[in-house]
Image (spheres, grey):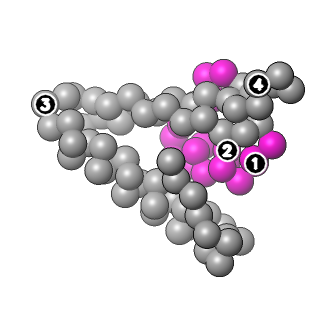
Amino acid sequence: MLGIAARYRKQGGKFADEVLLDALYDMLEREPNHESVAVFARVDRHNLPSQKMLRRIGFQQVIPGTPERRLGWWLLTVDR
């Protein structure tokens, strides 16, 4: 789970992008024997800043959030 403190918000997503990229690199390091790593994310359908961040990094929305199930599913396959 990742979260960004309020004092780092409203900066165009630079800090959030760095935090997410660091987490992705950590995941790759923990799986040295795999050619790629599939990363899933769940984001509230109303959380547009987080959705924009995932898109900037390359995630694709695979299941959108709905009124009944607010959290949508996102996927990124990270290749070596």
Q: Are marks 3 and 4 in contact (CB under 8 Å)?
A: no
Q: Residues within 10 Å of mark 1 (few under 14, many from 20)?
A: few
Residue pictured at 57% horizontal, 58% vertical: 3
Q: Residues within 10 Å of mark 3 (few under 14, many from 20)?
A: few
- Please provide percent x and percent y for residue 16: 55, 62
Q: CA distance from mark 1 to mark 3?
A: 35 Å
Work out whether residue 23 can be spotted: yes
Q: Look at mark 4 in the image and give the residue it sits on.
A: 69
Q: Residue 16 magenta-drawn?
A: no
Q: Look at mark 2 in the image and give the residue it sits on.
A: 51
Q: Residue type at mark 1? A: Leu
Q: Is 34 in front, or is 42?
A: 42
Asked if 11 appears above or below 29 in the picture, the reply is below
The boundaries of the magenta stretch are: 46-63
Residue pictured at 35% horizontal, 36% vertical: 78
Q: Residue type at mark 4? A: Arg
Quadrant including the C terminus: top left
Q: Look at mark 3 in the image and give the residue it sits on.
A: 33
Q: Look at mark 1 in the image and give the residue it sits on.
A: 48
Secondary structure of residue under mark 4 = loop
Q: CA distance from mark 1 to mark 2?
A: 5 Å
Q: Mark 1 or mark 3, which has the lower sequence index?
A: 3
Residue at the far right in the pictured view: 67
